[in-house]
Amino acid sequence: MGILFGLGAALSWGTSDFLGGRFTQKYPAFTVGLVSQSSSLLALLILAAVVRPDVRGEALLWGLAAGVFTGFGGMSLYQGLATGDSAVVAPLSACGAVVPVAFAFATGDAPTALQSLGIVLALVGTLLISLPREGVHFASGSHLRPVLFGLGAALGFGVFFVLIDNGTQSDGDAIAVIAAARFGGTLFVGALGVLTSSLVWPGRDLPKLAAVGIIDVTANGAFALASNRGNLAVASVLASLYPVQTLALSRLFTEERFTRLRIAGAGLALAGVAAISAA
């Protein structure tokens, strides 16, 4: 079940990132982030009122801290996608899986040998599938900003993975932890949006932006369940396969085309998932 939840998180995150990236071409990234964060927080509060989860102070603190980091990571990702270089930003943001993998090894919760091989294959595949088109080099000046945004997103998401896992492992209900994270993320994004004067009213697109948040928080919940039911490193790497979904949607609904390296990367990513699942 942990593996299925991890893959579900990847599908949901990949979909929300694709949609969010499209909206950042029309609205400021802080507007997209604040509406999506707020809508998902509202949905979680309604769910919490119905389910009445067990609320513990320690779990809420872990969730609030996670929200700040995922807010930072999300804004970095949206700002990077707004540059138009999603093929650079997406794979770099997925490297956030390195943080919980390193944390799992450091705390003695290392995956098996086969799972470790699967993790390596999945990470390499995730990078290859999103490499820039032929003739575009990472060293060029136009790639500096998206590279920095991608690395910022990786840092934010990687720390988020660890903090959410700590929250759910500290006898905290997943709903309460994710709701706290959404609250922290909403405050963080909203405050930065006000300080930078980057908030605008989206008008008729408000429901669409809200849907992005609902999809994103579904991914958060799936990851919380995945890490709670399995190895943190494995869950994090599976969830970090989201660029595969983002680029698949780009291939279907935009003019983006896959290169041979991207096809090879997809094969490696799938092989990694198979190795992780078989262990």
Image (cartoon, helix red, strand yellow):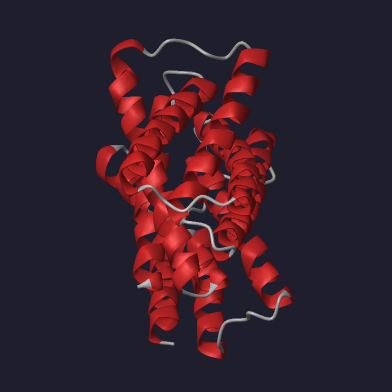
In this image, 217 relative to 108: left or right? Answer: left
Quick one: which residue is furthest to the right in this view? Answer: 106
Dividing the picture into quarters, in which one does residue 265 lie? Answer: bottom left
Is residue 261 at all visible to an observer of this figure?
no
State left or right for residue 229 relative to residue 169. Answer: left
Which quadrant holds the C terminus?
bottom left
Residue 195 versus residue 67 in the image, above or below: above
Q: Give the x, y percent position of residue 258.
A: 37, 53
Residue 191 in the image: x percent, y percent? Answer: 63, 21
Q: Residue at x 66, y 34 (%)?
A: 145
> Residue at position x 58%, y 43% from top?
70
Instruction: Name the one closer to the observer, 68 or 267.
Output: 68
Q: Position of residue 83 (x, y in %)?
A: 54, 30
Residue 275 at x, y percent in the picture: 43, 82
Query: Which is nearer the eye, 107 or 267?
Result: 107
Quarter of the figure with the N terminus: bottom left
Q: Residue furthest left?
A: 252
Q: Quadrant of residue 124?
A: bottom right
Task: Please say whether residue 152 is visible from this viewpoint.
Answer: yes
